[in-house]
Amino acid sequence: MATSGAWQQPVVPPVAAPVTVEGSEPMSELGSIPPLPVAPPRRRSVLGPLQEPLFRTLWIAAVVSYTGTWMQNVGAGWLMTSLTMSPLMVGLVQAAGSIAVFLVVLPAGAIAKCSAEALLHPVHQR
């Protein structure tokens, strides 16, 4: 393929012009191609996914759950601050709330991966 111009753009070979018949619009080699119908533009809403009942229920449950978790974390830190002014103790309470997640997430991920592979590949090819 040849190039031309300062930017070295490839020169594309010309495409055959469409066949025209007197008194009609241009035709391709396969015949007349009807115009495609164009759908009117739809307005998209940010809250559109919430119109699905199952997603809306899941979303509301997640918001309630996360709100409760945030309230528990703030309440535990506040209680420890009212009991003692030691920053170490307040930090330990916050760490104790999240250490369970770190101790459970890694083994649970490994177990889920192994069990998923066992379920997906019941017969191993040799």
Image (tube, rainbow, N blue to C red):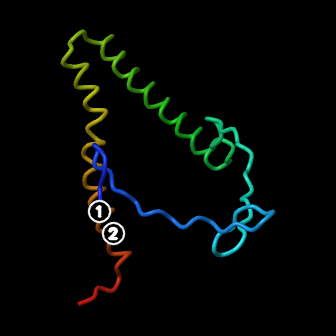
Decide: marks 2, 1 in contact (CB < 8 A)? yes
Task: Please give the name of the residue rendered at 65% of the width and 75% of the height, measured from the top-left corner.
Answer: 30
Q: Residue furthest left?
A: 88
- For label 1, the crowd category at 10 Å Cα-Cα, with few meaning under 14, some 14 to 19 and many 20 or more, is few
Task: Please give the name of the residue rendered at 38% of the width and 75% of the height, measured from the top-left corner.
Answer: 120
Q: In the rendered structure, which amino acid carries the disc numbered 2?
A: Ser
Q: In the rendered structure, which amino acid carries the disc numbered 1?
A: Ile
Identify the secondary structure beneath mark 1.
Answer: helix
Task: Please give the name of the residue rendered at 72% of the width and 69% of the height, measured from the top-left corner.
Answer: 32
**Along the horizontal axis of the image, is 107 left or right of 45?**
left
- In the rendered image, the vertical position of residue 46 relative to residue 122, given as above or below: above
Quarter of the image for residue 126 reads bottom left
- For label 2, the crowd category at 10 Å Cα-Cα, with few meaning under 14, some 14 to 19 and many 20 or more, is few
Residue 64 spot, x, y in % from top left: 55, 34
Identify the secondary structure beneath mark 2.
Answer: helix
Q: Residue furthest front?
A: 22
Residue nearest the observer in this picture, 2 or 37: 2
Quarter of the image for residue 97 reads top left
Task: Please give the name of the residue rendered at 61% of the width and 47% of the height, measured from the top-left corner.
Answer: 55
User: Which residue is disc 1 drawn over?
Assistant: 111
Quarter of the image with the N terminus in it: bottom left
- In the rendered image, the vertical position of residue 28 relative to residue 68, given as above or below: below
Number of residue marks: 2
User: Which residue is disc 2 drawn over?
Assistant: 115
Residue nearest the observer in this picture, 82 or 24: 24
- In the rendered image, the vertical position of residue 65 relative to residue 8, given as above or below: above
Residue 35 spot, x, y in % from top left: 73, 59
Q: CA distance from mark 2 to mark 1?
A: 6 Å
Residue 79 spot, x, y in % from top left: 36, 16
